[in-house]
């Protein structure tokens, strides 16, 4: 039986209600969105999509009493970040980010920089992956930025940035702040309206417990007004117009959405609201502490990033003395069937920052809400077994 320790890639298993809702949509509901005759099934789809927007706005404490129209659905957070960055950034603008970013934001930023559209400043984080507020303050004092984008928590070592501190600085300098919440949505409470985030980008298939193929943006209304739409096309509304409507949520959603995905995400968000993010956070902290304690007792491995559970998620990058981490990951996958993720995790600059670039990254072990202490014990035993065999010279 597989033991899944790769929750930073996608959460698994999903709550049972998620596949059930998707099956139900595809087998008995199934009407397209706003492209029917207002039959019962058409209204049912409209209701489902609106309820999902409402839950997302509730989870992230959206603006104007969590107005659901300011939730846009995209296939994943990568597209969400592309929509925001490419729709907002204009020639001559300056952007600041951190050295812990995932390629989901780094690549669009580098592309815009290469094309001469923007100037990019990357603030170097420390070896634990922490972005220091003094460094951000110093950068903001020196230069005027038009946007800041950063990841709330690192996907390689789990370090959680000081979001309230960073947002206070951005708000103080009047710089719109875009958050990559890929690793924290659903596992750390976030209030977009309290933090005054310009846009909160999310992915549906990690901590939000939904299916792959879902992500999106929660907008601050005035900021949504300043962003050009990424794609144009049919919205099932304003069909007399040859131009994309400016109304939300239609502005950023052309084409038939991933309705089975929305059915799954709706079920997942209902489950999440019932379970509570605070409970999930404390359970993950407990499991993370248990794993970290066990890892520290093993000989022959090197941990990177933070050495305690404070200010981090249960995501651990591991290297091995005299052994290739990818080979260890393959051995674990082979027998007893433990799933981790070796390599660079789409975050090369982040690996350079925490010192794991030279080893080609690390074997990342990431715990999720459905893991158990027993599974972690099996993993630790299996790892101890591998490390007890002398490494080849
Ligand atoms: C911090 C971070 N940002 C962005 C992404 C991209 O997510 P997706 O593939 O769902 O677009 C990931 C995925 O691992 C991530 O960890």
Image: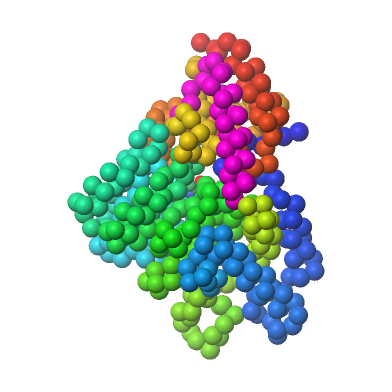
Screen quadrant of the N terminus: top right
Number of on-image labels: 0
From this view, report whether residue 322 is shown above or below residue 187: above
Please identify the quarter of the rendering in which residue 52 is found. bottom right
Please name the residue shown 53% across and 68% down the image: 66
In the depicted view, which residue is nearer to us: 278 or 251?
Answer: 278
Please name the residue shown 67% across and 44% down the image: 12
Residue ranking furthest to the right: 28
Specify whether 9 is left or right of 129.
right
In the depicted view, which residue is nearer to us: 369 or 229?
Answer: 369
From this view, report whether residue 136 is shown above or below residue 373: below
> Does the magenta portion include 38?
no
Residue 371 image position (x, y, % from top left) = 67, 37
Report the span colored magenta.
277-304
Please name the residue shown 50% across and 86% down the image: 241
From this view, report whether residue 129 is shown above or below residue 227: above
Q: Main secondary structure of the magenta part?
A: helix
Residue 114 image position (x, y, % from top left) = 31, 53
Please identify the quarter of the rendering in which residue 221 is found. bottom left
In the depicted view, which residue is nearer to us: 221 or 41?
Answer: 221
Please name the residue shown 67% across and 59% down the image: 270
One can see residue 75 in this view: no
In the depicted view, which residue is nearer to us: 195 or 329?
Answer: 195
From this view, report whether residue 228 is shown above or below residue 364: below
Specify whether 147 is left or right of 48.
left
Residue 165 image position (x, y, % from top left) = 36, 49
Residue ranking furthest to the bottom: 240
> Does the magenta portion include 303?
yes
């Amino acid at each position: 039986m597989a033991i899944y320790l790769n929750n930073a890639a996608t959460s698994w298993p999903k709550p049972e209600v998620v596949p059930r809702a998707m099956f139900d949509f595809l087998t008995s509901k199934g009407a397209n969105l706003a492209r029917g005759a207002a039959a019962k099934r058409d209204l049912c789809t409209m209701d489902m999509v609106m309820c999902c927007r409402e839950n997302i706005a509730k989870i992230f404490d959206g603006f104007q009493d969590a107005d659901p129209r300011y939730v846009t659905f995209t296939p994943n957070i990568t597209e969400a970040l592309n929509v925001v960055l490419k729709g907002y950034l204009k020639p001559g603008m300056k952007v600041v980010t951190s050295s812990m970013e995932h390629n989901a934001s780094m690549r669009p930023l580098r592309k815009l920089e290469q094309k001469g559209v923007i100037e990019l400043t990357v603030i170097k984080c420390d070896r634990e992956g922490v972005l220091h507020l003094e460094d951000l303050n110093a950068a903001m004092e020196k230069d005027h930025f038009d946007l800041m984008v950063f990841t709330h928590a690192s996907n390689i070592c789990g370090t959680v940035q000081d979001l309230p501190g960073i947002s206070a600085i951005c708000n103080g300098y009047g710089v719109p702040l875009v958050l990559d919440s890929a690793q924290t949505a659903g596992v750390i409470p976030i209030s977009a309206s309290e933090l005054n985030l310009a846009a909160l980008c999310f992915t549906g298939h990690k901590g939000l417990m939904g299916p792959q193929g879902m992500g999106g943006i929660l907008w601050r209304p005035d900021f949504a007004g300043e962003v050009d739409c990424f794609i144009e096309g049919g919205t099932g509304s304003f069909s007399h117009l040859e131009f994309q409507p400016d109304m939300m949520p239609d502005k950023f959603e052309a084409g038939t959405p991933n309705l089975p995905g929305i059915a799954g995400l709706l079920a997942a968000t209902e489950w999440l609201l019932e379970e509570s993010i605070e409970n999930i956070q404390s359970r993950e902290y407990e499991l993370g502490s248990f794993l970290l304690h066990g890892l520290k007792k093993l000989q022959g491995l090197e941990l990177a990033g933070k050495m305690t559970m404070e200010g981090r998620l249960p995501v651990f990058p591991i290297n091995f003395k005299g052994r290739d981490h990818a080979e260890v990951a393959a051995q674990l996958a082979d027998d007893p069937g433990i799933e981790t993720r070796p390599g660079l995790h789409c975050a090369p600059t982040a690996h350079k920052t925490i010192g794991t670039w030279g080893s080609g990254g690390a074997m990342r072990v990431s715990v999720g809400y459905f893991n158990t202490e027993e599974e972690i014990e099996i993993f630790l035993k299996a790892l101890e077994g591998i490390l007890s065999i002398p490494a080849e010279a």
